[in-house]
Amino acid sequence: MLVEALLALAAAGGGAVVQAAGTDAWNGVRAGIARMLGRGEAAREQGELERLDRTQAVLEVSNEDEIEHVRKAQAAVWQNRLEMLLEELPEAQRQRTAAELRALIEQAGAGGGSQSVHNDFSGSTFEKSAVQGSGTQHNTFN
């Protein structure tokens, strides 16, 4: 059984795959995930590349009504694959793979897949407010 930190890392890795698809970071993230999951076997790595390409294709053809559901589903698929990988590895290899995965997650975030939201509030009153989302948010209160 994986510890919570590794489960969270696998979840972030699944999200990074989806986030990177269609961005400048895609080729690097795609190659890194395939290499990681291929574990040194060329045929296995090629299979992962094909799965990653299918993920990108599904995301590209999804319409506005279904894209959020598709993104979540694809992220869950890759999260599961990464969890299984991390669970199977011996501890020393698991730590190296976790470090590689962290680097790929950072790469996905730097590849233009992140979104920024900017909100300006002027003369507003907030009671029992909540903001949900991901990415970077900037709030300016005047």
Image: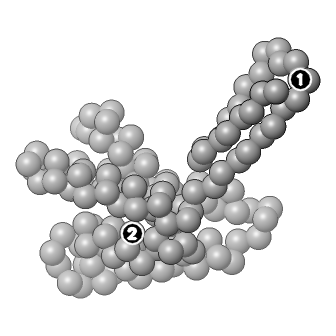
Image quadrant holding the C terminus, namely top right
Mark 2: few/some/many CA within 10 Å (<14, 14-19, 20+): many
Q: Which of marks 2 and 1 is nearer the N terminus?
A: 2
Residue at the location (25% across, 58% down)?
100
Q: Position of residue 90 (x, y in %)?
A: 10, 50
Where residue 1 sits, quadrant-wise, is top left
Q: Is mark 2 on a helix, strand or loop?
A: helix
**Is any part of residue 77 visible from this angle?**
no
Classify residue 13 by image quadrant: bottom left
Q: How was the colour assigned to the protein in this rendering?
A: one colour
Q: What residue type is labelled 1?
A: Ser
Residue drawn at point x = 10 percent, y = 45 percent: 91
Name the amino acid type tagged 2.
Answer: Val
Q: In the rendering, which numbered label is found on residue 10?
A: none
> How far across and how far down the image is residue 8, in percent?
39, 40
Residue 87 lies, in percent from the top left, at 22, 48
Tell me, yes or no, if residue 2 can be seen here: yes
Name the residue at 8% across, 48% down: 92
- Which residue is denoted by mark 2 in the rendering? 29
In this rendering, the answer to whether 28 lies above or below 127 is below
Q: Is residue 141 left or right of residue 36?
A: right
Judged from the image, the secondary structure of the residue bearing numbered disc 1 is loop
As drawn, is 142 to the left or to the right of 24? right
Q: Is residue 102 above or below residue 134?
A: below
Q: How crowded is mark 1: few (under 14 residues within 10 Å), some or many (20 or more)?
A: few
Report the residue marked by disc 1: 124
- Residue at the far right in the pictured view: 123
Left/right of residue 123 with respect to residue 95 in the rendered view: right
Given the current orientation, which residue lies at the most extreme top position? 127
Residue drawn at x 76%, y 70% as measured from the top left: 63
Residue 22 at what x, y percent from top left? 57, 74
